[in-house]
Image (tube, rainbow, N blue to C red):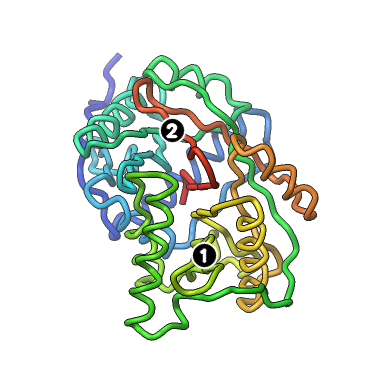
Amino acid sequence: MWQLERAVRGPLPLTEKDIPALNRLFADAFTDRYRRDGLVGVRVPFLNPAIWRYALSDAGAGAMCWRDEADKLVAFNIAHRSGSEGWMGPLAVRPDRQTGGLGKTIVRAAIDWLEAQGVATLGLETMPRTVDNIGFYGRLGFVPGHLTITMTAAVSATPGAGFTTLGALEPAEREQRLAEVCGLVARLAPGVDFGREIQLTYELGLGDVLLVGPPGGVTGFALCHSAPLAENGAREESRVLKVAALSLDALLAVLDAAAAWAARQGSRRIGCRCQGAYGEAYRALIGRGFRVRWTDLRMTLSGHPEAAPAAGIVWSNWEV
């Protein structure tokens, strides 16, 4: 029987003009994934275009796509690098092209790109209930690690003690305190650098950076976004994307600050992604009234593990 040519071109650059097609492919692919996992009633919404711009700008040349014979978007993978930390996501293949090996192609392309950047850690996150996904990544060399636990709590309008926002500072002081943040991250996780994510957060008006501790003595920070995740969504939840804290007490102070900041943004909830490797932090959040909303399985490529700090806490989301 005659069949259409199923040639695919890529990897090609993924740019802002692709966002409408990217949203459609993303929503269709992940809705189909949930359906096959038995979650028939789940429909994944389009993402806020500002969130896509953040992801694409952060990834730079790591934002890759593949096109079919009609020049339609058929797959994408967005690979990110935060200094020595590399990760990929989101990534998806159009549902009608998911059985021809294209998934392996897009993951290997991201691996090659990240390894060429010299990353020490190379990872991704996937749904832990999706056993075929875990097996798929396992065959490509990824090994399972801990869970990332998405947790939320109601916000409080009570100001956090010792809490400063970089956005409220004059340029000179902002640069000085930003250097403190970078120094804190480098001290706890040598080689990791969240500077690009922080810069893009301000350029795109997505959120702010919160600091706990006096000038010259920062003990913790959080990069927070208040922009809605869903297209045309309400600003109901602010999200903590990156965290570094010298101690559990400093982490809790940072999260208190994030809750107070979220209330100022008109959010009802604050969300964070607690890394399962930090058991004491998880227990402390449960004690503070945080509720578990979702889990993801963190996987790293063999030879590129994620190293936990010898002391302190560093949370780095591997999603947008």
Near mark 1 (Cα within 10 A), the count class, few <14, some 14-19 or many ≥20, is many
Residue 137 sits in which quadrant?
Answer: top left
Residue at the image position 52 percent from the left and 64 percent from the top: 224
Quadrant, the N terminus: top left
Residue underneath mark 2: 306
Q: What residue type is labelled 2?
A: Glu
Percent position of residue 77, x then y? 34, 40
Q: Position of residue 201 (x, y in %)?
A: 41, 67
**23 lies above or below 99:** below
Q: Gap in Å between the C-alphas at discs 1 and 2?
A: 24 Å
Secondary structure of the residue carrying numbered label 2:
loop
Residue sitting at 50 percent across and 24 percent down? Answer: 133
Whichever of labels 1 and 2 marks the residue nearer the N terminus, that label is: 1
- Count how many numbered circles sit on residues in the image: 2
Q: How crowded is mark 2: few (under 14 residues within 10 Å), some or many (20 or more)?
A: some
- Of tags 1 and 2, the one toward the viewer is 2
Q: In this view, does 265 lie to the left or right of 211?
A: right
Residue bearing the label numbered 1: 225
Percent of width and height locating residue 141: 38, 18
Q: Residue at x 29, y 43 (%)?
A: 72
Q: Is residue 75 above or below residue 55?
A: above
Question: Is 103 placed above or below 54 here?
Answer: above
Q: Say which of 108 and 281 sits in front.
A: 281
User: On the rendered structure, is 308 left or right of 147?
Assistant: left
Q: Residue at x 40, y 71 (%)?
A: 177
Residue 304, image x, y percentages: 35, 27
Q: What residue type is labelled 1?
A: His
Along the line of sight, which residue is nearer the eye, 307 or 24? 307
In which quadrant of the rendered view does residue 267 lie?
bottom right
